[in-house]
Image: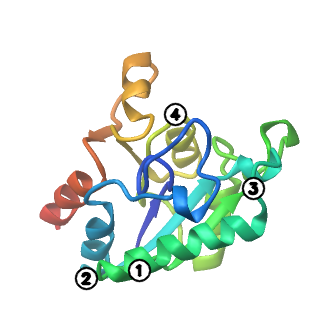
Amino acid sequence: MKLIILDRDGVINHDSDEYIKSPEEWAPVPGSLDAIARLKRAGYTVVVASNQSGVGRGLFTLDTLRKISEKMQREAAGAGGALDAVFYCPHAPQDNCACRKPKPGLLRDIATQFNHDLKGVPAVGDTLRDIEAAQAVGAKPVLVRTGKGEEVIKSGKLPAGVEVYDDLAAFVSALLERR
């Protein structure tokens, strides 16, 4: 199985410091849905792993999060793609759970669900938390400049060897050209 893990906010859709609190606020990053479609055509299993602390902070409900995910799925399907699964951590930072990135629990859940070792699996994110979670499970972290990616680069904290791309579409193009 060819598996790829994508963060949601800042990678697939535009991010907001005010959180994406409704399906109406969810809007794809240009090219991201087509990139997902290209991954599916190339035989990839595409999984989303996303911190969604807005639930734990009381900004929106699990039902609203489900509706946002359904919209994301519909839009991906409309572009000819699909998401094989969506994993999320609904906890607030102070909950100290094992699934909130940078902790690796969410990615370990993916490994268990798909019975797949994550060593070398591309994990695309836009934050240092995404990179650290990927590294903790042996996945291959990839940073995109969309969302908060540019802030990570400017911070000087990006670990050596992490590939950086303008956006998900640019990464998918590079990935598929390598095959």
| Disc 4/disc 3 C-alpha distance (Å) | 25 Å
Q: From the image, tell me which residue sits under label 3.
A: 60
- The reply to whether dot 4 and dot 3 touch (C-beta < 8 Å) is no
Q: Nearer the viewer, mark 3 or mark 1?
A: 3
- The reply to whether dot 2 and dot 1 touch (C-beta < 8 Å) is no
Q: Which mark is residue 82?
A: 1
x, y (%) of residue 124? Answer: 41, 52
> In terms of sequence position, does the residue under pointer 2 or pointer 1 come before the other?
2
| Disc 1/disc 4 C-alpha distance (Å) | 26 Å
The kind of secondary structure element at disc 4 is helix
> In terms of sequence position, does the residue under pointer 2 or pointer 4 come before the other?
2
x, y (%) of residue 3? Answer: 42, 71
Badge 1 density bin: few <14, some 14–19, many ≥20, Cα 10 Å: many
Badge 3 density bin: few <14, some 14–19, many ≥20, Cα 10 Å: some
| Disc 2/disc 4 C-alpha distance (Å) | 29 Å
Q: Which mark is residue 41?
A: 2
Badge 4 density bin: few <14, some 14–19, many ≥20, Cα 10 Å: many
> In terms of sequence position, does the residue under pointer 3 or pointer 1 come before the other?
3
Question: What amino acid is at disc 2?
Answer: Arg
Question: What amino acid is at disc 3?
Answer: Phe
In the shown orientation, is residue 21 left or right of residue 10?
A: right
- For image coordinates 37% across by 24% down, the residue present is 153
| Disc 2/disc 1 C-alpha distance (Å) | 10 Å
- The reply to whether dot 2 and dot 3 touch (C-beta < 8 Å) is no
Q: Nearer the viewer, mark 2 or mark 3?
A: 3
